[in-house]
């Protein structure tokens, strides 16, 4: 998730700040990446690189940066017209410093929500790929592997499938609720 956040923040901030053809190029590339079906992309990468934890990390990172870029892009467009940013520009503050000290801190509440949703997406993706045999390989533990192995015992020992499925559900919901709570706590406009 750290790689996805880093790439997404850089792409979104550059596109939002620069405007013009750079904005169009970066955001159309982001849109094109969003348009690629995730399952097709995963199959291509796994076919080329093989299964394993490294490939899984690469796939999840490659599928997770685009929503972050769109969030940062929107926040950059929103805040670059703010009076305090225009005043700093008129005083000659360089663009990288403006982005780092004035615009990106304003995007933190939205980034927190995006990151927690990204973690939930990563958990679901890893579990699904491991269930299909394309992710983490045994003997490494994975909730997807546990569900896949429990499939043959679902009628004789249903707990083997219920507990990993319940764990996935609870953890994903917990990350979603955590993101909502942090957004409410970090965003002063939501406090009333």
Image (cartoon, grey):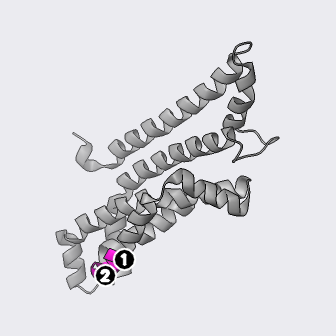
Find residue 177 and report its horizontal and vertical position in percent: 43, 36
Q: Is residue 10 left or right of residue 85?
A: right
**Residue beneath the point at 62% across and 45% down:** 126
* Quadrant in the picture for the N terminus: bottom right
Considering only vertical position in the picture, is 104 above or below 22? above
Secondary element at tag 1: helix
CB under 8 Å between discs 2 and 1: yes
* Residue annotated with mark 2: 21
Kindly give the residue lying farthest to the top in the view shown.
156
Kindly give the residue lying farthest to the bottom in the view shown.
92
Considering only vertical position in the picture, is 119 above or below 143? below
Category of crowding for the residue at label 2, using alpha-carbon neighbours closer than 10 angstroms: few (below 14), some (14–19), many (at least 20): few
**Residue beneath the point at 71% across and 62% down:** 49
* Quadrant in the picture for the C terminus: top left
Task: Choose between 10 and 108: the one closer to the eye.
Answer: 10
Q: Is residue 47 magenta?
A: no
Q: Is residue 180 left or right of residue 124?
A: left
* Residue annotated with mark 1: 25
- Span highlighted in magenta in the image: 18-25
């Amino acid at each position: 998730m750290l790689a996805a956040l880093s790439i997404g923040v850089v792409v979104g901030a550059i596109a939002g700040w620069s405007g013009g053809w750079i904005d169009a190029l970066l955001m159309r590339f982001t849109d094109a990446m969003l348009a690629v079906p995730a399952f097709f992309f995963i199959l291509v990468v796994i076919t080329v690189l093989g299964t394993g934890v490294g490939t899984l990390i690469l796939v999840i990172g490659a599928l997770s940066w685009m929503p972050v870029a769109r969030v940062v892009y929107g926040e950059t467009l929103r805040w670059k017209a703010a009076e305090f940013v225009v005043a700093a520009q008129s005083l000659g503050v360089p663009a990288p410093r403006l982005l780092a000290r004035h615009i990106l801190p304003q995007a933190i509440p939205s980034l927190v929500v995006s990151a927690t949703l990204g973690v939930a997406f990563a958990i679901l993706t890893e579990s699904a790929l491991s269930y299909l045999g394309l992710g983490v390989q045994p003997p490494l533990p994975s909730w997807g592997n546990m569900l896949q192995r429990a499939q043959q015992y679902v009628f004789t020992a249903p707990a083997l499938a219920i507990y990993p499925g319940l764990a996935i559900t609870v953890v994903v919901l917990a990350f979603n609720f955590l993101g909502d709570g942090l957004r409410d706590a970090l965003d002063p406009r939501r406090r009333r």
